[in-house]
Amino acid sequence: MLVSVIIPTYNRETTLPRALKSAFAQKGVFYEVLVVDDGSTDGTAKWVQEMAQRRSDVRYLYESNQGPAATRNVGIREARGEFIAFLDSDDEWLPGKLARQLRFFKENPDYLVCQTEEIWIRNGRRVNSMTKHKKFGGWIFEKSLPLTLVSPSAVMMRRKFFDEVGLFDESFPACEDYDLWLRASLFLPFGLIEKPYVVKYGGHSDQRSKEFPVMDGFRIKALCKILESDKLTPSQREAAFHELRKKCEIVSQGALKRGKIDESQYYKELPERIHEQTLSA
C-alpha cells in the first residue's frame, strides 16, 4: 500500500529539511513525498528540485501563492497513494508514525480517517496542551465546534475520504482545516491513536495565526456554511448555532473595542440572519 505524504510549504527553507528527514525516517512503509511549494521566494524550489532529481520518491509541485487550502488540494489531486498523510513543513514526525496508522486502518477497515497524539514545542520549549485542545476519537462533531481538534500533521486518511467529504475549501485563507474536519465529522468517526507521533513547533513569526489574529472570523464562516447545508441532525444544528452565537458575540465585542462599529454590528446580527435563512430554506 502506497502512502502519499503531502508537505505544503511556503518560504520554509530552514524547517523543511527537518520535516523531510522525519518523513524519510518512516520504515516499513511504501511512500511518495509530494512537496507542494506555494510560491516560495527563498531557496525552497532549488533545494527540493535538486533532491527530487536524486530521489525517485520525491516530487516537487508548484502552486502560485494561493494559500494552504489550494496547496494541499494540489497535492491531493496529484497523489498516487491509497492513503494520504499531511506533514506541515514546520513540524516533524516521530519514527513509526505511518506504520502505526496503516495498522490502525487494517484493524479498523470501516474507518476513513485517523490521527495520532502530538508533542508541542513553543519557542524551543516543550509545553503541555490545554484541556480545550484534548483530542477525541469517534464522533467528534460537537467537540470540534469550539476549535480545531484534528491536526493536519497527525492525520492520515484513505483516498476515499475526499470522495465522501470533498477537498479543502479554497475560499478560506486560514482555518481551512477546521472547515474540512467539521464537514467530515458530521457523518464520519475519527480514529485516535493515543501515542504522540508528531512534534508540532509553534511561536515562530510566520504562523498563520499571526497573519490573521481574529481566527474566529474564519471559524464563524465555516459554521455559517455548515448551518446553511442540509446535512445536520437537529442536535448537531442546535450545537452549531450555540457555538455560532458564542463566537459572534466574542468577535463583535472585539470589533467594538477596536472602534469598528459596522463590523461589530455585522457579527452581532449574523446569528439571527443565519437562523432565519435556514428556517426559510
Image (cartoon, rainbow, N blue to C red):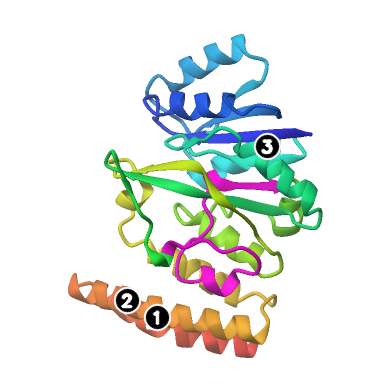
Task: Tell me the CA gap for discs 1 and 3.
Answer: 40 Å
The correct choice, above or below, for 223 with respect to 19 in the image is below
Are the residues tagged 2 and 1 within 8 Å (C-beta)? yes
Q: Nearer the viewer, mark 3 or mark 2?
A: 3
Are the residues tagged 1 and 3 within 8 Å (C-beta)? no
x%, y% of residue 164? 75, 58
x%, y% of residue 87? 53, 38
The correct choice, above or below, for 239 with respect to 24 in the image is below
> Which image quadrant is residue 29 in?
top right
Q: Does residue 79 appear in this view?
A: no
Task: Tell me the CA gap for discs 3 and 2.
Answer: 42 Å
Q: Earlier in the sequence, mark 3 or mark 2?
A: 3
Q: Residues within 10 Å of mark 2 (few under 14, many from 20)?
A: some
Label 3 residue SS: helix
Task: Tell me the CA gap for discs 2 and 1.
Answer: 6 Å
Q: Which residue is mark 2?
A: 250
Q: Residues in magenta?
A: 133-157
Say which residue appears at 26% left-offset and 78% top-offset: 253
Q: Which residue is mark 1?
A: 246
Tag 2: amino acid: Ile
Q: Residues within 10 Å of mark 3 (few under 14, many from 20)?
A: some
Q: Nearer the viewer, mark 1 or mark 3?
A: 3
Q: Residues within 10 Å of mark 1 (few under 14, many from 20)?
A: some
Q: Which residue is mark 3?
A: 99
Label 1 residue SS: helix
Q: In the picture, which quadrant includes the C terminus?
A: bottom right
Q: Does residue 186 appear in this view?
A: yes
The correct choice, above or below, for 53 with respect to 215 in the image is above
Q: Is residue 31 left or right of residue 269?
A: right
Q: Reply yes or no: does residue 154 show up in magenta.
A: yes
Q: Reply yes or no: does residue 134 show up in magenta.
A: yes
Say which residue appears at 49% left-offset and 39% top-offset: 88
